[in-house]
Amino acid sequence: MLSEKMLFSIVIPCYNEEKNIPILVKKCWESLKNFNVEVIFVNNGSTDNSKLILNEIIINYPKFKFINASKFIFLIFSKLF
């Protein structure tokens, strides 16, 4: 199934969500593992351990990706739309 083209991507921004990330990742996997989608978690300039936790957890889920971005980038991006 992973070799098939993804139908769509779900992007989930995370800001200081270190306590919620493990729960969120598990729930997303349980809900979406049988669908042809990818989930992209974006650490949006967190000041807690969100980046570290995402980095460690995501490697166990083949359909999930992790992007580490600064808050500044997303502020600019959001102003474009």
Image (cartoon, helix red, strand yellow):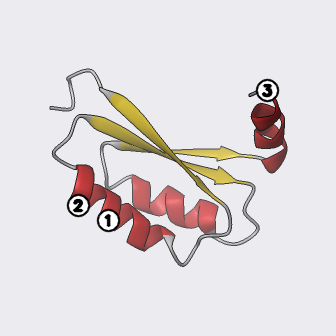
Occupied quadrant, residue 46: bottom right
Q: Residue furthest front?
A: 81
Asked if residue 37 lies left or right of residue 71, the reply is left
- What residue did someone put label 2 on? 30
Task: Look at discs 3 and 2 and give the one toward the viewer.
Answer: 3
Residue drawn at x 83%, y 34% is 76
Q: Which quadrant is the C terminus positioned in?
A: top right
Q: Position of residue 50 (x, y in %)?
A: 61, 66
> Could you say whether the residue bearing mark 3 is in a helix, strand or loop?
loop
Asked if residue 19 lies left or right of residue 70, the reply is left
Answer few, some or many: residues within 10 Å of disc 3's Cα (few below 14, many 20 plus, some between 14 and 19). Answer: few
- Residue 2 vs residue 20, the one in the foreground: 20
- What's the CA distance linking mark 1 and mark 2? 5 Å
Asked if residue 42 lies left or right of residue 73, the reply is left
- What's the CA distance linking mark 3 and mark 1? 31 Å
> Could you say whether the residue bearing mark 2 is in a helix, strand or loop?
helix
- Whether residues under marks 1 and 2 lie with C-beta atoms below 8 angstroms apart, the answer is yes
The tag earlier along the polypeptide, 3 or 2, is 2
Give above or below for 62 relative to 51: above
Give above or below for 43 relative to 7: below
- What residue did someone put label 3 on? 80
Name which residue type carries label 3: Leu
Name which residue type carries label 1: Lys
Task: Look at discs 3 and 1 and give the one toward the viewer.
Answer: 3
Give above or below for 2 relative to 68: above
Q: Position of residue 64 (x, y in %)?
A: 38, 46
Q: Position of residue 24 (x, y in %)?
A: 42, 66
Query: Which of the numbered marks, if any, corresponds to residue 75?
Result: none
Query: Which of the numbered marks, if any, corresponds to residue 27?
Result: 1
> Could you say whether the residue bearing mark 1 is in a helix, strand or loop?
helix
The tag earlier along the polypeptide, 3 or 1, is 1
